[in-house]
Amino acid sequence: MQKILVSRCLLGHRVRYDGGASGPFDQLAQWLDEGRVVPLCPEVAGGLPTPR
């Protein structure tokens, strides 16, 4: 199964600069349930706080 790298804010995680989120979206939620999604927030992984 092919893995898909997806920003955490698109999965509904509150990691945007303003502490908000952009999702979750139906297709991404389905892929997450199937184990295809690798969630990542590059800004948080780089050490930036939320909200910024």
Image (cartoon, grey):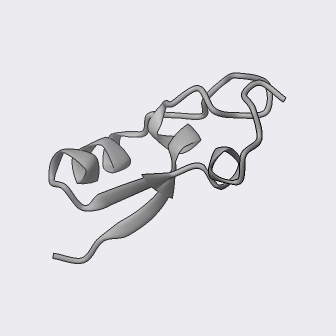
The vertical placement of 51 against 45, above or below, is above
Q: Image quadrant of residue 4?
A: bottom left
Question: In what quadrant of the picture does the C terminus appear?
Answer: top right
Q: Image quadrant of residue 17?
A: top right
Q: Residue furthest right?
A: 52
Q: Which of 4 and 42 is in front in this view?
A: 42
The vertical placement of 42 against 11, above or below, is below
The vertical placement of 5 against 19, above or below, is below
- Residue shown at 24%/77% (left/top)? 2
- Residue shown at 67%/23% (left/top)? 20
* Left or right: where 2 falls relative to 6: left
- Residue shown at 44%/34% (left/top)? 24
Question: In what quadrant of the picture does the N terminus appear?
Answer: bottom left
Q: Nearer the viewer, residue 39 or 45?
A: 45
Q: Residue furthest front?
A: 47
* Left or right: where 31 falls relative to 26: left
* Left or right: where 46 falls relative to 30: right
Q: Position of residue 37 (x, y in %)?
A: 32, 57
Q: Which residue lies furthest to the bottom in this view?
A: 2
The vertical placement of 46 against 29, above or below, is below
Q: Position of residue 26 (x, y in %)?
A: 34, 40
- Residue shown at 15%/53% (left/top)? 34
Q: Position of residue 36 (x, y in %)?
A: 24, 61
Q: How many labels does the image show?
A: 0
Q: Which of 11 and 27 is in front in this view?
A: 11
